[in-house]
């Protein structure tokens, strides 16, 4: 896994094998961050990486200057890796939380400038996740939400939806609150 930008650009992290994850490809991640640089100046911002897995997005956000990044995953092996990787890079701005994502979204009092979610593709309730994020007001005004999903999922029905991008088999839906 490669960090593509920021202070740790080109740094390679090696998560252990056997994690139950489907990491965002480097090509898709690079395209995603190229798009997002038009919407967000990362310095001092807050980020949330839901279904964090290997932490590819969380590490990228930390590297690019986010003041605080929270990585949430339920799997203990992923949590252990996230803590180890964070320690290797000495990332004081990265908080790792072991929690069911839906429970975390309902209970956290925090608000974020950027939220990324990469749920398991077999998950049936993508719409519920987006709805919960907006109902619980996790996104700050002018904040950006990106959901990675399979092609079969259509999230364009939300009023906050503004863009869909596809990179190979990876699909991103973008949402933004008006300031």
Image: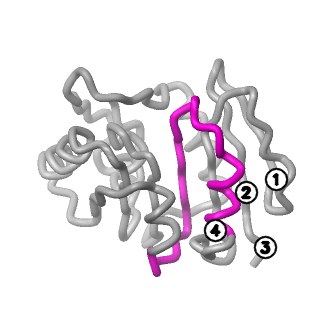
Residue 92's place in the image compared with 109, above or below, is above
> Could you tell me which residue is drawn at 64 percent across and 38 percent down?
124
Is 78 colored magenta in this rendering?
Answer: no
Where is residue 94? Give x, y as percent.
28, 61
Residue 142's place in the image compared with 51, above or below, is below
How far apart are labels 2 and 1 at the CA level? 6 Å
Is 121 colored magenta in this rendering?
Answer: yes
How far apart are labels 4 and 2 at the CA level? 8 Å
Query: Neighbour class for label 4 at 10 Å: few (<14), some, many (≥20)?
Result: many
How far apart are labels 1 and 4 at the CA level? 13 Å
**Residue placed under numbered mark 1 in the picture:** 162
Quarter placement of the C terminus = bottom right
Q: Is residue 121 left or right of residue 51?
A: right
Q: Secondary structure at mark 4?
A: strand
**Residue placed under numbered mark 2 in the picture:** 175
Does label 3 or label 4 sit earlier along the sequence? 4
Stretch of the chain drawn in magenta: 108-134
**Residue placed under numbered mark 4 in the picture:** 143
Q: Which mark is residue 178?
A: 3
Where is residue 106? Give x, y as percent.
52, 70
Quarter placement of the N terminus = top left
């Amino acid at each position: 896994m490669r960090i593509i930008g920021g202070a740790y650009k080109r740094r390679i992290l090696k998560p252990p094998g056997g994690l139950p994850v489907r990491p965002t490809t480097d090509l898709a991640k690079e395209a995603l961050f190229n798009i997002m640089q038009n919407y967000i100046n990362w310095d001092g911002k807050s980020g949330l990486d839901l279904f964090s897995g290997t932490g590819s997005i969380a590490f990228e956000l930390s590297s690019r200057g986010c003041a605080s990044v929270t990585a949430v995953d339920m799997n203990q092996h992923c949590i252990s890796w996230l803590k180890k990787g964070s320690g290797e890079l000495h990332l004081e701005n990265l908080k790792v939380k072991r929690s069911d994502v839906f429970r975390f979204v309902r209970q956290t009092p925090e608000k974020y400038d950027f939220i990324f979610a990469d749920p398991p593709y077999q998950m049936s309730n993508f719409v519920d996740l987006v709805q919960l994020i907006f109902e619980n007001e996790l996104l700050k005004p002018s904040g950006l939400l990106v959901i990675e999903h399979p092609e079969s999922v259509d999230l364009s029905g939300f009023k906050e939806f503004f863009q869909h991008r596809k990179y190979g088999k990876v699909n991103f839906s973008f949402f933004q609150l008006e300031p």
